[in-house]
Image (cartoon, rainbow, N blue to C red):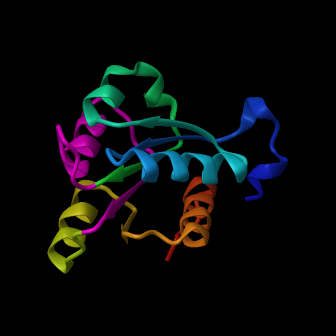
Amino acid sequence: MDVTKIDQQQRPKIVIVEDDHPVRRSTQLLLQAQGFSVKAFSTGVALLADDAALDARCLIADYLLEDIDGIGLLLALRERGWMEPAILVTGYWTPTLVKEARTAGFSEVLEKPVKPRALVKILAQLISGQSAN
């Protein structure tokens, strides 16, 4: 999927939840430059308070947030009926965490620091309905 050729109205909406401001902002700018419509949040509670977030085509969530972990955030979104793909990013990658995240519904678990090209490729594949693996 080449999102750069999609008009502004059709750009896939991505939500990011990351409590580290520089990481959140750089990810937002990267994805916007690739043609995605991006809304970024510093907390899970802020995302859950925004009903418009339920229109997102994909969630990118940090595992450790100040108010809720990324897995709890995805489960809360699932309870609200949001069933789109999600990517968990973490600096604490373990096989146990990956298993827990996949059981909760995450399509991908990426270790920080996330490689920008890999993130864009995985995101485009998930949104187009292709397997990212």
| Image location (x, y in percent) of residue 43 | 29, 35
**Mark count:** 0
| Image location (x, y in percent) of residue 23 | 44, 53
**Does 24 sit above or below residue 114?**
above
**Does 95 sit above or below residue 34?**
below
One can see residue 98 in this view: yes
Residue at (52, 72) in percent of width and height:
115
Residue at (49, 77) in percent of width and height:
133
Left or right of residue 53: residue 128: right
Q: Does the magenta stretch include residue 111?
A: no
Residue most extreme to the front: 22
| Image location (x, y in percent) of residue 50 | 39, 21
Please identify the quarter of the rendering in which residue 79 is found: top left
Is the N terminus in the top left, top right, bottom left or bottom right quadrant? bottom right
| Image location (x, y in percent) of residue 78 | 29, 39
Observer-nearest of 60 and 133: 60
Left or right of residue 9: residue 74: left
Q: Is residue 85 magenta?
A: yes
Residue at (41, 70) in percent of width and height:
113
What are the residue bounds of the magenta stretch?
Answer: 63-91
Left or right of residue 55: residue 105: left
Observer-nearest of 39 and 54: 39
Left or right of residue 114: residue 8: right
One can see residue 59 in this view: no
